[in-house]
Amino acid sequence: MMNFKQITPLDYPDLKRFFNHQKYRLCVYSLSSLLVWSNDVYQIYGATDGDILYVYAEYPSRPQDRHLILPISPSLEFSPDKLRDLAQDAGIQSYWFVPDHYIEACGISSVESYFTVRPQPHFDDYVYLTEDLAELKGNRYAKKRNLIHQFDRAYLSKNRVSVEKISPSVAGECLDFLKKWCESRDCHIERDEDFTCEKQAVSNTLENIDILGVEGLLVRVDGDVSAFVVAAYLTDDMGVMHFQKAYQHIRGLYQFLDNLCVRELFKGYTRLNKESDMNLPGLAQSKKSYWPVEKVRSFELVLR
């Protein structure tokens, strides 16, 4: 029987080795993301066996949503029959966040021999060419370039902007900004479970940024934190943008932040994962406006 225990950001140094040459292109397979999203609402558990890390998650208030993710190993592959055996041994009925490329590699008929396959469209990730977002060339990015130029004229050229690396010492300022950002969007901090979880994930990230293998930038406008972004490793050729927030009333700030992040934090990566749109129409429109080259689709596998 696997010895699962709850894992936290403090476990990052011990678990990092399992993610060397990690192949799955969904953002949940970023170690930093797994660790920081663990909270009172959504809890992450891990168990190790030699060269393999097993992970499951549960919602204490929704036991029916208990699920595994694909086992993580720098050297081993896991066929559908092995996934079936693991799920049975763990007493867990389903896997979440199974990327489309895993199913394609195994063959849908092989997977369906052991599992019912269900799409999870709210967890599909948007992927972009880093070069596209760094250079913003061509007519399709004309509006983005224009907004950056407007921000430059109104703020950068007037020395109203400063950029700095995120460190634990500015965690409080970033969290204060996040609260104000949410209030400006009327997202009901006390009642919105998604925002509560995200706020805790951001807090976990900022307070442990020195050990989590992530990098972050914040932008100050007139001395106040007005935007920030946090990015991390996902696969050998793909980075992932975990958190990206900017005040909407500062015209061009979001586009400036996005372009700055790609140029500064994604050097050496050919592709960039901007995570999912959570089935939010406005967020989906924003992500599509940057012209993704693919969507990595997520599936649930339920034991037959």
Image (cartoon, rainbow, N blue to C red):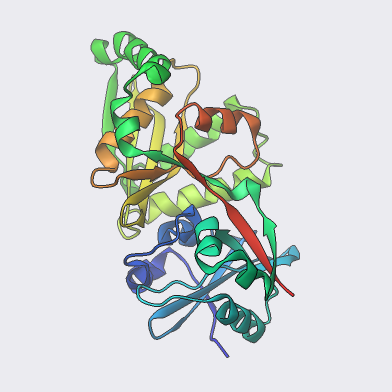
Residue nearer the viewer, 179 or 201: 201
Instruction: Measuring from the top left, give residue 9's x and y in whole percent.
Output: 42, 63
Q: Quadrant of residue 161?
A: top left
The answer to whether one can see residue 256 in this image is yes
Residue nearer the viewer, 194 or 127: 127
Total labels drawn: 0
Seen as rendered, the residue at the extreme bottom is: 1
The residue located at (39%, 53%) in the rendering is: 207
The residue located at (29%, 43%) in the rendering is: 266
Instruction: Measuring from the top left, give residue 264's x and y in whole percent.
Output: 25, 37
Q: Quadrant of residue 281?
A: top right
Residue nearer the viewer, 188 or 252: 252
Instruction: Tell me if residue 254 comes above or below residue 66 in the rendering.
Output: above
Instruction: Tell me if residue 21 comes above or below residue 261 in the rendering.
Output: below
Instruction: Tell me if residue 147 comes above or below residue 266 in the rendering.
Output: above
Q: In which quarter of the image is the C terminus?
A: bottom right
Q: In which quarter of the image is the N terminus?
A: bottom right
Position of 137 with respect to 63 (left or right) is: left
Instruction: Tell me if residue 172 comes above or below residue 97 in the rendering.
Output: above
The answer to whether one can see residue 252 in this image is no
Instruction: Measuring from the top left, give residue 80's x and y in whole percent.
Output: 58, 75
Q: In which quarter of the image is residue 151?
A: top left
The residue located at (62%, 58%) in the rendering is: 299
Position of 137 with respect to 107 (left or right) is: left
Instruction: Measuring from the top left, give residue 226's x and y in whole percent.
Output: 41, 27
